[in-house]
Amino acid sequence: MSIAIAGSGDVTRYLTEELGRANLPVVILSRREKPQFDLPGVTQQVVDYNSVPSLVAALNDNNAVALISTILDYNPDSFIAVHKNLIKAAQQSTQCKRFIPSEYGVNIEEYPDQPGFYYETREPIRQLLREQSDLEWTLVCCGWLVDYIIPSRNRYLRDIGDSFPINLADTRMVIPGTGKEAVDLVAARDLANALAALVQAPKGTWEPYIYISGEQTSFNKVGGQVKEKYPQLNFDVQYLSLRTLVNGVRDAKDDFERIDAEYKIVTVSNSAHFDPAKVQRHREKYFAGVHFRSVQEILDAPDVIV
């Protein structure tokens, strides 16, 4: 029995480690092997994402019972095509009857079109999953990954500049809205730990939307904690109004500018805010053994990969 992961990016590094700690063998499906995944209990399987038979063979050869996608692709056509093939492959496989598509976003249950580019790429896959009954599936809502508040040497996630409101490398805080809006944040490793717990939950227990959160807070509060942690840094702080962000989507010179503005809108649209009761219910149902760290715990963590 193994857990298959489609994609070999930064989040997969955390996920591979946490699945390993849970004594779950892992097979990574990717276009090429990567040295960082030459680990005990990890198999790297080179596949053709455009070939369903290639994916089916990889799942069957490794006795995969669940498939998790971490693929990040901003091109709607390729993202949709790959995920359709992943679904078909799991359906045709011998044992792989659980699937988690690449979502890891905001409260898509109530805000399915946030951020805008997510709706373009994810909604066709969500609909496809709803219309079938061969696979058990869920859409994971986790809010913002908060790891960018610590130095890059202490995380696998690469810097994304001002795309995250706290830009530690460039000592800037570019905060959407007023900074008072409620947002849910989680560390990438805690998300991975939760996914490891999720694939071990009894069959038939997954809900269509599962909420994962480390802490509900605001970016003003997080900004204050970061300033206190790094008193030697002089941060330039600016706030972006909803009007500014909407105009940024409209007037974007390229896809990157548009996507960046759409990411930021989730904070002011309230879609990055989860119902605490739902978060707590899912903690009790799925994640009783997972410790979700607060922002302060992450800031106070030792000088290692957190």
Image (cartoon, rainbow, N blue to C red):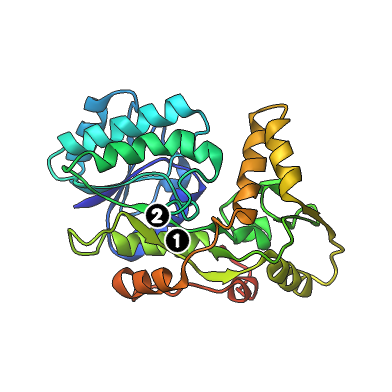
Q: Which amino acid does label 2 sit on?
A: Val
Can residue 31 be seen?
A: no
Whether residue 111 sits left or right of residue 177 in the image: it is left
Nearest the eye: 64 or 304: 64
Can residue 142 be seen?
A: yes
Nearest the eye: 229 or 258: 258
Q: Residue at x 39, y 73 (%)?
A: 290
Residue 105 % position (x, y): 49, 51
Whether residue 131 sits left or right of residue 153 in the image: it is left
Query: What is the quadrant of the C terminus in the image?
Result: bottom right
Whether residue 27 sits left or right of residue 296 in the image: it is left
Mark 1 residue crowding within 10 angstroms, few (<14) / some (14–19) / many (20+): many
> From the viewer's perspective, is residue 129 above or below residue 111?
above
Whether residue 266 sits left or right of residue 32 in the image: it is right
Residue 142 % position (x, y): 47, 58
Instruction: Quickly name the residue at label 1.
Output: 191
> From the viewer's perspective, is residue 17 above or below residue 131?
below
Nearest the eye: 268 or 85: 268
Instruction: Specify which label sits upstream in the sequence, 1 or 2.
Output: 2
Residue 279 % position (x, y): 42, 69
Instruction: Quickly name the residue at label 2.
Output: 140
Q: Which amino acid does label 1 sit on?
A: Leu
Mark 2 element type: strand
Residue 299 % position (x, y): 65, 71
